[in-house]
Amino acid sequence: MQIALATFKTGEGKEATQLLEALEVDIADYKLLSSPTGDLLIINLLYGNTDIVLDNLAERFDFETDDDRSLIVFSPDTVIPFNKEKLQASSFKANRESLVTYARNNSLIDDNFILLAIMAAVIASLGLILNNIPVIVGSMIIAPVFGPIVAIAIGIVLADFKLMMQGVLSEATVLSIAVVVGLLMGLIVPNVVINSALKTRMFPTVADLFVALAAGSAGAYSLISGVKSQLIGVVIAAAIIPVMCTIGIGISLANSMMVGGGLLLLGGNYLALILATVGVFYLKGLKPQIWYKFKAQKLVKKSLILIVVAVIILSLPLSWITYQRMIKEKPEDKVRKIYRKKFGDELETDLLSIQVQGKEVELFLYTPDETDEYFFKLLEKRIKEELGGEYRVIFEVVPTRRFQFPLGSDEKS
């Protein structure tokens, strides 16, 4: 439920109630208090069309520049409805002005915004370098990336170019800070190696796009339906802030694969997040002010088409990486199957490791000292048939010998 408190100059409140009557707002859903110092109109926004009511009031009365007027919209913590039938028939949806205010406040570049971005980037970079997942999660809690994405999405849906550009500029600021901090951390911390946390973001897959789509949808739905969105912001930050820092670390290591993979993942995540957020806002009925209706409809359609096309284009390399890393059988797996079949060693107790570097396969294993060399030639032939003749197979063999002493030998000695 939401309540609007509108203050007017003395005598204007009656004109405002006449406007509500023309909009067919139930007389039981508003109350007017008049006094010599001004009029106060209390409107219950639970049952009516919130945006239409606020639009008409804002069009008729100047709340922005006139100090004698004001408009406050808030959501009460507890509501005991006097009409349960109305409550059951209605569905809560945050009004447009509340969403716009949220987007503006949380995408404003000020000292707090910059400080949070720097701290989040430092924590995320160190978490990536140390391969410490809890530390990486900690950076997501304070990363200010949700507000700018909401600002971009709402700017598109409402045709508010100023709000959209504010979101773009704020997100670009976070990106710049995170990349620079990641670069500095990569240079300052000694002996930085490519661990699993960095490797995951070096090779993005289609699954990452689905995560971003789900996170964007959840974030937009939480805002427009009134659900608390702090945890949703953490999920969205998970798709953004560590990736930004990975790019900076990749630059410090001069690792083009890390930088390229990070940029691909970041671009895909951004597009998926904005696509999901815009889609949810649009489908849930977030509408612009009346005079921007047709302009906004054109912008939403063009933006959705452009974003969908970009997502499809980005999904092509992501699909290839997904196939290579998650679907296609790796050379190591094929060699293991051949080894199990030839040696009958299902548990691989005698196999130390298999290393594949380029077109070279090297097996490290224990074998009895009397194993015939011909057996390894057969194994090499089978591996080349499976992988291709261009592979070179090397065996690093540790020979083993079996000793068996007669019973009671210790006593005799």
Image: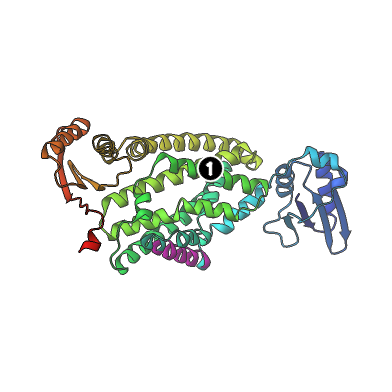
Q: Is residue 115 magenta?
A: yes
Which residue: 45% across, 38% down?
307
Determine whether, in the image, residue 301 is placed left or right of residue 382: right
Count of picture labels: 1
Determine whether, in the image, residue 130 is placed left or right of residue 79: left
Query: Where is residue 9 drawn, in percent x and y?
Result: 80, 58
Span highlighted in magenta in the image:
112-126
Quadrant for the C terminus in the image: bottom left
Residue 156 in view in this figure: no
Which of the 4 image quarters holds residue 292? top right
Determine whether, in the image, residue 292 is placed left or right of residue 262: right
Which residue: 42% across, 37% down?
311
Compare residues 362 and 36 and report the one nearer the observer.
Answer: 362
Compare residues 67 and 317 and report the one nearer the observer.
Answer: 317
Which residue: 59% across, 35% down?
294
Q: Is residue 71 above or below residue 307?
A: below
Q: Magenta stretch mostly in which secondary structure?
A: helix
Which of the 4 image quarters holds residue 310? top left
Query: Where is residue 242 drawn, in percent x and y?
Result: 42, 56
Query: Where is residue 173 drawn, in percent x and y?
Result: 44, 58
Question: Callout 1, which amino acid?
Answer: Ala
Q: Is residue 305 magenta?
A: no
Q: Residue furthest left?
A: 373
Residue 291 in view in this figure: yes
Which residue is identified by label 1? 214
Query: Where is residue 74 drawn, in percent x and y?
Result: 73, 55
